[in-house]
Image (spheres, rainbow, N blue to C red):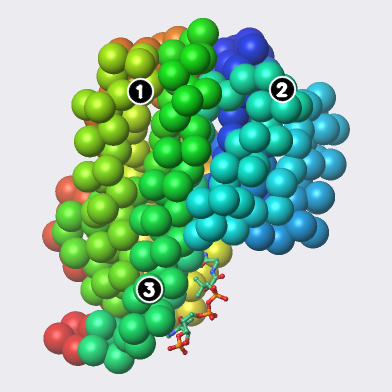
Amino acid sequence: MTFTADALAGRVAFITGGASGIGFGIAKAFAACGARLTLASRNIEKLTAAKQELEAMGAEVLVVQTDVRSPEAVQNAVQQTLEKFGQLDVMIANAAGNFVVPAEEMSANAWKVVIDIDLNGTFFCAQAAFDALSKSEFGGRFIAISTTRALEGWPGCAHAGAAKAGIMSLCRTLANEWGDRGIRCNTIAPGAIGDTEGVKRIYEDQGVANRQLASIPLGELGKTKDIANAAVFLCSDAGSYITGADIVVDGGRNRTHSGTGYPGKRD
Ligand code: COA
């Protein structure tokens, strides 16, 4: 146990993409710290399996099949959360889609689908949660997942890089606009997190996993638990004076100059 079992006691957290990867890692850490949870994602089988595992840990869990591209669907899932738990203290906009394709070959629809899920979906989550977060007795928390590639540029993932840069800007705006409501708005920037679909798609499937590993000063891929620990910290009382920040959790990768790991034309 990294944090105390009551670090998030009394809180209700809503996590998009919460049934797998980084989102499920956050859900498990939040359950271990006493939070009640809503998981929202598109896949009901994954949601059901995640709910069972979290309930076995003793957590109270609501799952709502949700596509974050629909503002109405997100609003409905938040409404169901309020009906079940009576409050919402934390919104974690984690759901994302991504795949590798060179910019000049990217179809208009491929660009649009990633912007829709990552950037538009994050905005819909923030807006749907605003009212409830502003009433949180703990001080509301809005967290979105970014990446250091957002500001460096992300060769092979122009759509996701642009979306994540937009997410960083959005959260900085919200930190300003919502500070007087007590809502802390931050992003977490994961590096290469080994046990995720993202690393499989972006590095392993492209045959660049070893190059990626070599660019990490700490010498190993991250784990979903590492991102979850940052999220617990931000959402606990210990994180109460942090807003408008981007918390980088990448083993130092953004401080190296060994390339992006993309099998590009000039590599
Ligand atoms: N390479 C190039 N284009 C791709 C692609 C790939 N690997 N995957 C999807 N696309 C394109 C499709 O061809 C389509 O464009 P088109 O209509 O011009 O052909 C467009 O993207 C939409 O794809 P579609 O499969 O219809 O979208 P979807 O909503 O069903 O799926 C995705 C969403 C594309 C993001 C899908 O990859 C997904 O569900 N991902 C979730 C998991 C994930 O990405 N995890 C990693 C997070 S880092």
Residue at the (41%, 68%) spot, across then down: 114
Instruction: Report helix, strand or loop for mark 2.
Output: helix
Q: Which residue is mark 1?
A: 184
Decide if residue 72 is in sight here: yes
Q: Amino acid at mark 3?
A: Lys
Q: Where in the figure is residue 140, as x and y percent of width and height?
A: 45, 20
Of the numbered discs 1 and 2, the one sitting upstream in the chain is: 2
Q: Amino acid at mark 2?
A: Phe
Near mark 3 (Cα within 10 A), the count class, few <14, some 14-19 or many ≥20, is few
Q: Which residue is mark 3?
A: 112
Q: Amino acid at mark 1?
A: Arg
Instruction: Report helix, strand or loop for mark 3.
Output: helix
**Is disc 3's CB within 8 Å of ligand 1?**
yes
Of the numbered discs 3 and 2, the one sitting upstream in the chain is: 2
Near mark 2 (Cα within 10 A), the count class, few <14, some 14-19 or many ≥20, is some
Query: Height in image: 160 above or below 33?
Result: below
